[in-house]
Structure formats: structure tokens, C-alpha cells
Amino acid sequence: IREVINSVLINNYISVPLIKDGKFYTLTKLGLVSLLPKATIKGKIASDVMIFPYCISPDDGIDVARSIIRQMNVNRLVIVGKNDKTEGIIDTLDLLRTVTGKERRMVGELGGDKIKLGGVSASSKTLMHTPSVKTLPDTPLPQLVKSMTETNTDTAVIETEKFQLSLIHIS
């Protein structure tokens, strides 16, 4: 298992194929994290592995979100609204679904990049998704990993009473 985990992390694979009892499975990074030896994460808390994310306002358009994602080479942005609370997350797949809408799929690549992105808000309910795991910085890491695997989510939002937003993302 350790060799598989190292290989996935070093080569930045999204998932790896697995054959068990003659059946094919896909093992994702989230699945690999759940297989980590308990001693590896025992005694650690969320703040030990969290990162500080790039954020946008709910009023920003998806053109702004796309620009930040491209320029900063990140996969997701946190949408922070009133009272400095997380409203949602927008990631590259959300943008891809929007940009390659039904009309573009019908005409193929003829449309190129001539799609107007400025009119759609990043906080559009069809675009952003609400994080299913929110927790505090002092949450024990084994508990957080369990929550993430049970909800099948690879991102957890860490919020504190004072505005301090962080992410834990398995990428």
C-alpha cells in the first residue's frame, strides 16, 4: 500500500486501477487516504495539514474565477460571502461544465473560446457546490479523514470564529 500511495502522490495521479478477485476497481486519492496507517495521522489535527485558499466574492463572475484558477494554477476557489462565511466552492470541473454547455457540445470546437463568461455569477446555484465537510482547526485528523471518506468529498473547509478560512484538499 505504501508504494501505491507514494506513486500516486509523486506522479500526481488522480486514481489508480485495482484488480481484486478478478474485478476492476478504481482507487482514488481519497480512498488511499483512508488506507493510511492510523499511526501516520494519529495525534495530528486539521491545522497541521490545512492550506489557505484563494477566495472570491459571490458577486464575481465566472470569468474572474476562471482567470484566478488559470493564473494561480489552483483547482478550486472558495466563495466567501457576507459575514466572511463560506457560501460554496467552485472548481475546475464546475467551470468546465459551464463552459462546455449544451450549445458548445452540439457545435463541437467551432465555438472556440468565444463563450461569454462575464454574465454568470460564480455563486450561481448551478455552478458552485456547498462543501459537505466543515470543521474546526483543532479537529483530530483521523476524525476528519473519516468524515471526508463517509461523504466522499476530497475537500474540507476549516472555519474559525474570527475570519480565518482554510482548506484541506486531497489532490
Image (tube, rainbow, N blue to C red):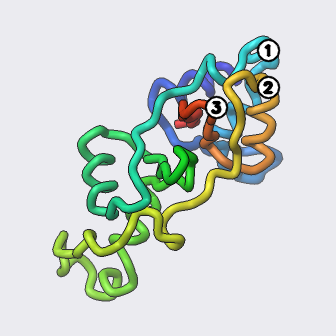
Amino acid type assigned to the residue bearing label 3 in the image: Thr
* Mark 3 nearby-residue class (10 Å; few <14, some 14–19, many ≥20): few
Q: Name the image quarter holding residue 141.
A: top right
**CA separation, marks 3 and 1?**
23 Å
Spot occupied by residue 58 in the image (x, y as percentages of width and height) = 43, 59
Does the CB distance between marks 1 and 2 fall below 8 Å?
Answer: yes
Viewer-nearest of discs 3 and 2: 3
Label 1: which secondary element? loop
In the picture of the structure, the residue carrying the numbered disc 3 is 160
* Nearer to the camera, 83 or 9: 83
Would residue 159 be visible to someone looking at this image?
Answer: yes
* Mark 2 nearby-residue class (10 Å; few <14, some 14–19, many ≥20): many
Spot occupied by residue 77 in the image (x, y as percentages of width and height) = 44, 47
In the picture of the structure, the residue carrying the numbered disc 1 is 42
x 59%, y 33%: residue: 168
Would residue 166 be visible to someone looking at this image?
Answer: no
* Nearer to the camera, 165 or 133: 165
Instruction: Give the side of residue 13 with respect to residue 48, left or right.
Output: left
Amino acid type assigned to the residue bearing label 1 in the image: Lys
Amino acid type assigned to the residue bearing label 2 in the image: Pro
x 59%, y 30%: residue: 162
Number of disc labels: 3
Does the CB distance between marks 3 and 1 fall below 8 Å?
Answer: no
Q: Which mark is residue 12?
A: none
